Amino acid sequence: MQTTSRLNDVKHLRDIFNAQNSKALKVAFDALNSSIEISEEDLEVQFNRYFVGPMEPVADPFASVYLDNPDVVMSQSTLQVRELYETMGFTYPLKNVIPEDHLGVELDAYYQLLYLEEAKEITYLSELRHYFLHEHIHLWVPRFIEKALRESEHDSKAITFILLQLKSLLIRETTTQGVTA
Amino acid sequence: MSYSKENVESIVNNGISRRSFLKGLAASGVLSSFPGGILQANEDLNTKIPYLGEKSYQTFRNACPRNCYDTCSIKTYVKDGVMQFIEGAQESTYTRGGCCVKGNSYVKRVYSARRLKYPMMQVGGKGSGNWKRISWDNAIDIIAKKLLEMKKEDGTLLGAALTKYSGNFGITHYGIEGMFNSIGYTTRLAGTPCWPAGIDAQNLDMGDMWCNDPEEMKDSKFIILWGVNPAANSIHSMKYIYEAKKKGAKVVVIDPVFTEAASKASQYIQIKAGTDGLLALGMAKIIIEAGLHDQKWLDANSKGYKEYKAYLDKEIKLENVSKITGIPLAMIKELALSFAKAKPATIWMGYGMQRHTNGGSMIRAIDAFVAVSGNIGKYAGGARYGHLSTWGFNYAALSMPKPEGSVGYTGPEGAKGDVAQGKDAKSNYTDRFLNINKTARELLNAKEPKVRLLWVACKNVFAQDFDRNQLIRAFQQLDLVVVADQFFNETAKWADIVLPVATQFEEYDVNVSYWHYWLTLNEQAIKPLFEVKSDLEIAAMLSKRMNQLQSGSCTFPQSVDTKAMMAKEFNPGIYEQFGIKSWEELKNGPVKAKAVIPYADGKFKTPSGKFEFYSDKALELFGSALPAYLEVRKPYDKFRMTSPHSRWSLHSQFQNLEWMEDVHPEPYVYINPDDAEAKMVKEGDTVAVFNKQGLLRLKAKLTDNVQAGTLLMYEQWYNNNIYNVNELVDDTSSDMGAFKTGAPGVALHDTFVNFRKL
Ligand code: SF4
């Protein structure tokens, strides 16, 4: 039970950050079981203001922005993540189109790695997953969350909810379940 | 810890351990067990694939397509599909291996987090800031249906307007006009906010605008940089100027502002704005009286010299010239005489000077002075302004036929912009032209039919056009505003739909300059990021959808490949001019046009075939056959305001990049210390600069680089700042521009303001 929820949480958060329209976003949001009532359109408008654009979003969902340069994507950190994915055995159809360190893509990688371990009991990539979590995700996602939360706490319950879900996921992964030894 | 950092990093970064790790991976069953998502299991896992350190560079040819004299030829280095760095192409003697501070930021610009990434629709009304993502299909569908609905209701497509200017000067970008051509007769914001009065002036005098090769300036013996600041805005030209100076040439800068170029010149002459034409007339009088004019050349090659000389004799008083221009007479005499004695001598006229109510007449007066001195048609001489002589492409992307049965405007036809556009010879109809320099008012006033749809491309209307408050009103009354751009700017804020557009590194194109004589291929170096598309692809999608909805409603190709479109722009004339057999040769680097000295054969494309001091056309259109002195606009407020280009940006482009903001973080008004003192303003104080048009708040910098009585502010868009110097500009026209470009220019530099400390 716990395994399923752990996997599902990552999956729903991944789907939120990869949604391409209101409907997909709302489905993924509702899957997180929030009690917040919000229309598809309002949710997307808020989500875009925080993470997508077209105006400068509150917090860009790219690692490079936190690790390399606040205005740049597809930089050093992105290419490090690219190397990591390639070593993990992934191929990325959106290579050079959407940077590999977009939060949605990173959550997708993390989800798939976790799935191998939890659902298939294959541990070959476990060390790489831990490395990815502690040496990459953990270096920027908390900063991303804090930046967005500072604003969302005042004006968006839905965004705050998403961010808190992400935060608690990260805490769980990096503390208890993350280090299984 | 359940991982070892060193171990993982060695797997990832060390070729040997990576390969053995991948072999183990293939054996472990991982690949068939991934659940799959955005990332997929790599079924062809190549355990020999190189890791990043082994991936090699590919190079591509690119050009800087900005509205800049220099149109740099660029070599782009790409690794694993990612741009790493660029350099100026070594093959071009003009670019010679280096770009400017703006060009050098291209990698950061392409990969800026601020790029527009997806098509989006503003759902809470214009300016609400409520945006939804929409698919390309959806966006194009909305636009196509709107166009067809308008056509049905109005009987024409004149309700659809296009405003496009110089955001990308690549030749295939005329495909944006092509897209509008291909749907029928439409409304165009026509004319140019840039250089129209000067274009007209040169055409009246010489039948063309055709400058000598700037690389020749290295052999000039005397160079006047008249109202131009190449040290900031055409840095690649400076090496020729320095070389000439080193070889003993005198370099004089005449400018109301002490510019970077002035600081590098042999002499700087500060002139009162708007009096340059009078100075040129005075200088001509001086050399004629001294017998230093080139009588032989004038006899053989000019028309109306006698009338011109009579005018100088009768109307031009040297004491008045000195008084009005603010330059001591002895200095004027020395300047004129030493220019006339040096051969070859040349004058480079900037675009700022003609942005006055008497701008065209001033360019004519300077042309005349250069002609009198015998420097027209000479190697390393010339009255330089610009040229389009290497722009003889096919304009295949532009030249789209109207759909069968299209109905348009039946009013008078005019020329339209920098590059003349084909008129449908068989038709009685034309597009409807509105003056781009009065965009707000013209959009509001257009009737029968009203403008309902506006497409903005290669242009940031709110940063470049005038009268912001009226613009907001104009935008708000439109049913559908589409903004196609690379960044979210002030104009996009007022759009209904924004479409993310490719940079030059994400598409093919071909580029030439309006200043130098090089031809550069622009190759697609990287995949388009996110969902961006080239302007041509957008046009093709629109065509496809319109034809699905109503067959025959759009003639634009329904699918395009920017490379094929680029190739279609070439013709035997271009190949001949540049000495190549195929555009493919440009992959080896840019090439230069065969050397020609403008007008060396004494042939001018004027009605008389000669240099025309006396122009009947000028008399007919602008009321004066001669380049006579025309007084500049009278001040309507305390201080003249001047708004030149800065070295950090090209209009609104580049300034939004984060690192540019570091070096140039906010707008300033530059004030002469005497004026500042009178208003008790100190360095760094916030001041209000205001006039009947509007008010700007910004910080003051004190400098005597600007004359007392003049305030200087750079024209550009600042990210997160609605500063737009044009809010203080009314749309008063300059004298010329309507002859060749369809509409007069704007007298930007005849803006007057006052200021106070806040
Ligand atoms: S802005 Fe001008 S000088 Fe700078 S890279 Fe582009 S063309 Fe060259």
Image (tube, coloured by chain):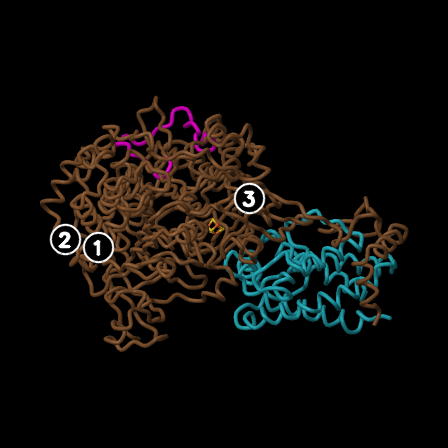
Chain colours: A cyan, B brown
Image: B568 above or below B734: above
Residue sitting nearer the eye, B496 or B71: B71
x%, y% of residue B157?
Answer: 37, 35
Q: Secondary structure under badge 2? A: helix
Q: Which mark is residue B318?
A: 2
**Residue at image location 18% in from the left, 33% down from the top:** B616
Horizontal side of B13 relative to B672 (left or right) equals right
Q: Mark 1 touching mark 2, by CB under 8 A?
A: yes
Residue B161 appears in view: no
Horizontal side of B580 relative to B597 (left or right) equals right
Which residues, given as a range, are shown in magenta? B394-419
Q: Secondary structure under badge 3? A: strand
Give the residue pinned by disc 1: B332
- The amino acid type found where label 1 is placed reads Ile
Query: Are the residues flagged by discs 2 and 3 from a single subunit?
Result: yes
Label 1 crowd bin: few (<14), some (14–19), many (20+), radius 10 Å:
many
Horizontal side of B638 relative to B517 (left or right) equals left
Q: Nearer the N terminus, badge 1 or badge 2?
A: 2
x%, y% of residue B716?
Answer: 39, 58
Q: Label 3 is found on which chain of the structure?
A: B
Looking at this view, name the residue that lies furthest to the top: B426
Q: Nearer the N terminus, badge 1 or badge 3?
A: 3
x%, y% of residue B115?
Answer: 54, 54
Quadrant where the N terminus of chain B lies?
A: bottom right
In magenta stretch: residue B225: no
Q: Mark 1 touching mark 3, by CB under 8 A?
A: no
Residue sitting nearer the eye, B243 or B495: B243
Give the residue pinned by disc 3: B62
- The amino acid type found where label 3 is placed reads Asn
Q: Nearer the N terminus, badge 2 or badge 3?
A: 3
Label 2 crowd bin: few (<14), some (14–19), many (20+), radius 10 Å:
many
